[in-house]
Image (spheres, rainbow, N blue to C red):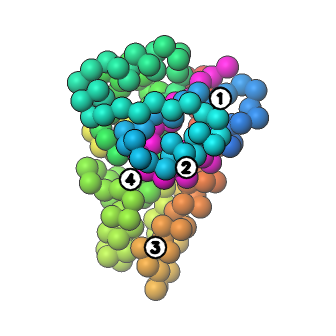
Amino acid sequence: MKKIAIFASGSGSNAENIINYFKNDTENVVKIVFCNKPDAYVLERAKRLNVPTFVFGREEFSHSDLVLNELKRLDIDLIVLAGFLWKVPDAIIEAYENRVINIHPALLPSYGGKGMYGMKVHEAVIAAGERESGITIHYVNNHYDEGTTIFQAKCEIVPGDTPEMLATKVHALEYEHFPRVIKELLEKGL
């Protein structure tokens, strides 16, 4: 049985989608949801779906082995960042080399980096007059949004699209592809 840990900071719609995707999977399981905000809605979603949660603060994450030790204790195989906004500490990246993945709401390497998340990305894409956007699923390394790309999917931007309309298109791509790509990675053997 391969064990997945999801890291999330916000509402958790991607986390819920991933948990539901794997709920009847006999070979893979979402073991836990880690969250850096005690009031994030993702914690309610996880509770409703009977997935344990682990809440931590910045000091615990960045300057101690608390989170890393919990990952090891649970024998986690793959770490999935689903709307998690903090930079992952080097110790976790080294311990889980090529086993930490993220989804970004644009076609990297464009519109990535520190501070580029959520609506900020969609606003920048629309402001630049791009004709397409999409998602990038990538490995996490020591730099924001610079890890090797695993998968990309595109959507068209038509004249008149607002950042909110683009966000809806991108969310649809996330929900369609993220769980499937996670399963493919697990099946390839990490």
Would residue 66 appear left or right of 105 to someone viewing this image?
left
Of mark 2 and mark 3, the one earlier in the sequence is: 2
Q: Are marks 1 and 4 in contact (CB under 8 Å)?
A: no
Q: Are marks 4 and 2 in contact (CB under 8 Å)?
A: no
Kind of residue at disc 1: Val
Which mark sits nearer the N-terminus, 3 or 4? Answer: 4
Residue 127 drawn in magenta: no
Q: In the rendered image, which residue does mark 2 sit on?
A: 14
Alpha carbon of mark 2 to alpha carbon of mark 1: how far? 15 Å
State the separation of the CA atoms marked 3 and 4.
20 Å
Q: Is residue 51 above or below residue 175?
A: above
Helix, strand or loop status at disc 2: helix
Which residue sits at x=30%, y=29%? 61
C-alpha gap between disc 1 and disc 3: 32 Å
In the image, residue 21 sits, relative to residue 90, either above or below, namely: below
Q: Which residues are magenta?
A: 1-18
